[in-house]
Amino acid sequence: MTDLEADLRKAVRGEVGFDVTSRALVTMDASNYRRVPLGVVAPRDADDVAAVLEVCRTHGVPVVPRGGGTSIAGQATGTGVVLDFTRHMNRVLALDAEARTAVVQPGLVLDRLQDAAAPHGLRFGPDPSTHSRCTLGGMIGNNSCGSHSVAWGTTADSVAELDVVTARGQRLRLGQEWAGAPTGLRELVDGELARLRTGFPELPRRISGYALDALLPEHRADVARSFCGSEGTLGVLTEAVVRLVEAPRARALAVLGYADEGAAAEAAAGLLVHRPLTVEGMAADLVPTAAALPRGGAWLFVETGGSSEREARARAEEIVRAADVLDALVVTDPAGQRALWRIREDASGTATRMPDGSEAWPGWEDCAVPPQRLGAYLRDFRGLLVSHGLKGTPYGHFGDGCIHVRIDFDLLTGPGIARFRRFSEELADLVAAHGGSLSGEHGDGQARAELLPRMYGEEMVALFERAKDIWDPDDLLNPGMLVRPAPLDTGLRFSVLPREPVEVAFGYPADGGDFSAAVRRCVGVAKCRTTSATGSAVMCPSFRATGEEAHSTRGRARLLHEMLAGEAGGLVTDGWRSEEVREALDLCLSCKGCRTDCPVGVDMATYKAEFLHHHYAGRRRPAAHHSMGRLPVWLRGVDRMRAAAVVNALASVRPLAAVAKRLGGIAPERRIPKVATETFSRWWGRRKARGAGGDPVILWPDTFTEHLSPSVGQAAVHVLEAAGLRVVLPPTVHLEKAPVGDGRTVALDPVSLLRGRGRVCCGLTYVSTGQLDRARTVLRRTLDLMAPVLETSAPVVVLEPSCAAALRTDLPELLHDDPRAAQLASRVLTFAEALEQLAAGWRPPALNRPVAGQTHCHQHAVLGDLAERRLREAAGLTGDLAGGCCGLAGNFGFEKGHFEVSRACAEDQLLPSVRQAPEDAVVLADGFSCRTQLEQLAGVRGRHLAEVLAEALRSGEGADAEGGP
């Protein structure tokens, strides 16, 4: 233990982390930069903050305050001690509805303040797109704005008083009329009044530099306002009094369509006279699908408020009439508005990928110009991009003249980095020529501070340095930011990554087969750190359960980044054998939620499987990998010996079950599921074939349906045949030619007989436990069995969502060298998709009941659930299913040591949705894991949609609606 660490542990009551994991988690923010700290401290209060500053001053070690770590200019990273306020100093201390103020701590997430203010009809005005994870301290440090700044301004406009601790331990209460000003600051301002009155551009989004003009007499010498945007370089914030605004009782969203972004930019300033709440802009190249948007190539999102929905709509329609648009859409439904706003908010992540899939990076994320000059500036900006051979997709706060853009800089090679510098210098000159600010929202940090003289001139920047020296004479706080900055092209986070692709098992087709590129996808926007999932969202259940950065998608990506950096400067130096990485990935549920919910498509489930594959290569695996990873083998053995009844009887004897669970690495709190005494295939073999003639539909007998819940398969057969489809099972022997197979086929040629019988398998349990060699063997055997099917056009219906997802994604990515893998993946249909696509004229029985339950996480992340929603609607099953993850997640919730996290994940959304459901609600759970979790934690029987429909058909409900295709 170093002297610094020892002294900190003696001085503070909060956590002190100098271990590899703690440091790795904060090496980066959402910028292009990386700094390795000495340690991390999570202070409990202002006394802890003062103690940390005293110890670090004694040791000559810098201190960096950090909130949500979503800063885009590098200012939330440092080489000394990082203060993490999110763990303890994260509360609303008081809220005065009458005075419209709140007292908050710096680690408070913005959405939690909004939650506290909402019952009083109030809200905090600024709302960055990262509102679900950014903190008030970070917002004050960067002077953040958000989409509503045309109505409610920047964070500085909402700050009344600030409690700060200076680097030398002085505690100050900052406010107006020089309240809390450190000695010498007033004298500095009094001597530079003329410069301060003339040296700052007039525009709503001027964030760059220190706001020294707020100290002018005509601005009431507002020290608190001047502190905003100082990026942790002047003092450490410990508490803030902030102003709240009245929230409109109703809102309407007008989406205005224009031919291109230039036309939208030209129109934005003219809409401000109507006093909208937002004027946001984005172009078609940032929208995955424009189906929900009005006609056009670019759009303005203009929000209006009112005391009623009618008044809000009237204001929105007035703006539509005043705007010269190609097309427009006005939405007053809150759910519809949220869906549209998600398109805009996700742009911060979507923009990190160009339309062709190539990478794009921040660095010039948020320049701002006077709104009236936005159109001209955008034209010049586009021209500058072309002249440097670069591409970018602008979007942002058009009403305030602030543009966000990610650019396809090459930050991996010397020539690319040199071009990055040249472009940065020329763009700084262009912004200054338009009377703009290098930063309009996210601060200067390292990305832009070096270029501030081009905006302000050398004398004003020298004044900034003098102000910094008054506040922090020892240069202890966040050195290298804002003044005396580090060069913008040093410390790039990519410099330590390997230049050659790492040998891996998966194909990573979206990343050119490069695992480093896959890990680089995480740019740190931290959508995975949301403390509550909304709608159907899944990511990231383990973070919501633990609140620990190491258990977020971003945290795991940071550790993988350090692992790849290895000996080149990474904190993790033992590569795939790293215990730090294994521990962080251990609580990843492999829910695949990040594959869809992460704006940049990080797929941590795949990365986890990859890591486990290498980590355990040639080593002893945990018992759970054998007991549950090889589940298909054990269950087939039970079936061959006809031992299901015996196994179930033994599992019901508690001492025997306890021994089995201990040997198998299974959580003692779990009950071992019962094995079906008759498998689905045996039931299939003894029934008489039914259904119509015609081309077959292959029903996939996944392991869970086959051995653990054959009633789901039986129900699906009943419904599919009622819909007029001919259901068959996959071949169980290797056939050289037709028949395709119905699960009963016996090969007649000797070669096939020698090969023996087999069962198709998606390999899911092997993939989730990282047994990728075994998974490949199983999947190749499956492709061999399915060969005659693939020579036809027969679709493959998969009832278990996790197995369908594995066939859709894991199969082609793991066997990327076998064209049959992509062919089979393209044939996979869910139960609802099969009915919709193959039996379009069929109508389900009318159930007319509410539903409760949860959309399977893999269904949400990989398969999509639109067909399921439409089928439920057609059957009269009303209401939405919850999002999130059930927490069992295949083997995860059964593994020893995972039970509490598994239960916490279930309590996040699934269990509350079932408890709050009406008595007559149908509890739907298409996944075996979801049904098992419901049964074991809530005593509730969940059913597959096929079971619900089959029961209705059998009982004659809605018989007149069965019809035919």
Image: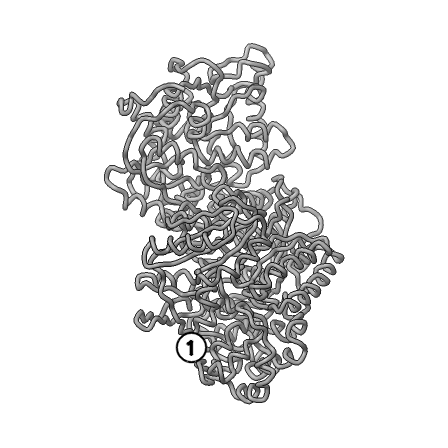
Q: Is residue 102 above or below residue 612?
A: below
Quarter of image, res 603: top right
Expressed as whole percent of the image width and height from the top left, the position of residue 114 reads 38, 62
Q: Residue at x 46, y 36 (%)?
A: 802
Residue 42 in view: no
Which residue occupies the extreme right position in the image? 415
Q: Residue at x 38, y 18 (%)?
A: 964
**The one of 669 and 480 positioned closer to us in this rendering:** 480
The amino acid type, in three-letter code, at marker 1 is: Glu
Secondary structure state at the residue bearing disc 1: strand
Q: Is residue 563 above or below residue 730?
A: below
Expressed as whole percent of the image width and height from the top left, the position of residue 399 reads 51, 61
Relative horizontal placement of residue 404, taking residue 488 as reference (left or right): left
Q: Is residue 23 above or below residue 327?
A: below
**The one of 76 and 701 positioned closer to us in this rendering:** 76
Q: Answer few, some or many: residues within 10 Å of disc 1's Cα (few below 14, many 20 plus, some between 14 and 19).
A: many
Relative horizontal placement of residue 832, taking residue 263 as reference (left or right): left
Quarter of image, res 671: top left
The colour scheme applied to this rendered structure is one colour
Which residue occupies the extreme left position in the image? 919
Q: Residue at x 51, y 70 (%)?
A: 141
| Residue identified by numbered label 1 | 161
Which residue occupies the extreme top position in the image? 748
Quarter of the figure that contains the C terminus: top left
Expressed as whole percent of the image width and height from the top left, the position of residue 816 reads 63, 34
Residue 843 in view: yes
Relative horizontal placement of residue 665, taking residue 230 as reference (left or right): left
Quarter of the figure that contains the N terminus: bottom right
Expressed as whole percent of the image width and height from the top left, the position of residue 927 reads 40, 36
**The one of 520 and 433 positioned closer to us in this rendering:** 433
